[in-house]
Amino acid sequence: MDWPALALWQSSLGYSRLTDLAGDAPVQVMLGQGTEFVGSVEGICLAATTLGAYLARPPGSMGTYLAECPLAQAEPGAALSPGPLHALMADIRIPEAVKGSPLTSINLWASLKWVVKEGRGPGFPQTRSSRRGRTASSLHYDPYCNLLVVVCGRKTVRLTPPTADPTLRAHPVWSDSLNHADADLARSPRLPMTCVSLGPGDALFIPEGTWHSVASTPGTLAVNFWWRSAAGAALESGATAYHLRRSLQVLLERRRHAMLREAAAAAAAPGGAGGTTATPADALLRAAARGEAAALHALRRALLALSSDPPALMRWVHCTLHRDAHALLGALVGPGSELALGAVLAALEAPGGDEEAVRAFFQDLYDGLPLERGALLDLILERRRALSRLALADVLARHVPGVP
């Protein structure tokens, strides 16, 4: 990174350079609790000052952070315009990697370093110096693509993908910090995590929506570039409601299939419907042929275990139809049967399935059950909708916390 700032912003002389360029510029300083700043959007206060005043007299009683102070910014669909710290652009360059991207802002981030003299005893004959100014953010994501460039000091960035969202204890969607989460990646070894250490001149690309936390050593200065992705721009268009519905649809379908896979695995495990038998389909066929009541009562779990073997599944269902149609009806469309019916339909609708076999299955079902065809179809559709409602409730609980 060929920036004048890499030479001019180092050590205490860097503060003088910043003050010379933009000392009178207004800034908002985040105030935390204690001598280090560790926080999210909630639980902090903002103090208005100027960049020069902040650099000259950092408060020693509480942690501070100069975050997201714009050098340049843009309204949606507009070009960049100068921000309060635009004079600092004299020492940086827009990287080639982001030229041509629809930049929304260029920002300064500062974790200041200062020395506090502490004394002991009358007259404080002994003193010690302590360096303060470390900052750390909580886990969060940004609604923009991000290129983070460290000018001086060091930053440690921990990242986890958007797919980890359900396990991160994200804040409710109605909160002021909905893009923050309570998980600590440094103390969560089971979460997928990448840790990157950045020094002067290093740059890191953070994709839109990627969960990350950032810790900075005292005296760290950095500049970042935010821009909208095509997906982010689409979300801000007039089709926002469509994108919400489409996103929920995709998540719902994934969760519905995952629920069936999870239940099938549980049913096929030792102690489940399949037990430890090598061929659970054949075992259930033999049990049904003997008229064992346990085979009928186990139908709901058995269907899950057989869902990966459609021919065996249909043979078993046909056999059961001839022995006890009422039991089969209860297992397929009775209360709590969402997963059982879902497994049957998933097996019948599997890619490459035999359409004639599917038609024969439903014909046998209609002929074998003491129920008018329209009423049976209504029951099947209702149980299918019930499975979708279960999946949607799970999706909302996992990805949109705070929605009742």
Image (cartoon, rainbow, N blue to C red):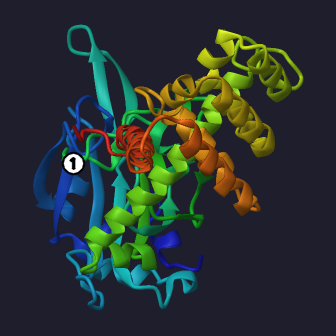
Question: Is residue 193 visible from the viewing direction of this image?
Answer: no
**124 relative position to 155: left or right:** left
Residue at 48% over, 34% down: 370
Is 79 in front, or is 67? 79
- The picture places residue 82, in percent across and down from the top left corner, at 24, 85
Q: Quadrant of the N terminus?
A: bottom right
Up the image or down, 128 lies above or below 85; here it is above
- The picture places residue 44, in percent across and down from the top left corner, at 19, 40
Up the image or down, 395 lies above or below 74; here it is above
In the picture of the structure, the residue carrying the numbered disc 1 is 30
Is 231 in front, or is 336? 336
Q: Quadrant of the C terminus?
A: top left
Up the image or down, 319 lies above or below 207; here it is above
Which residue is most to the top? Answer: 121
**222 relative position to 67: left or right:** right
Residue at 21% over, 14% down: 123
Residue at 52% over, 33% down: 332
Up the image or down, 77 lies above or below 211; here it is below
- The picture places residue 61, in percent across and down from the top left corner, at 20, 32
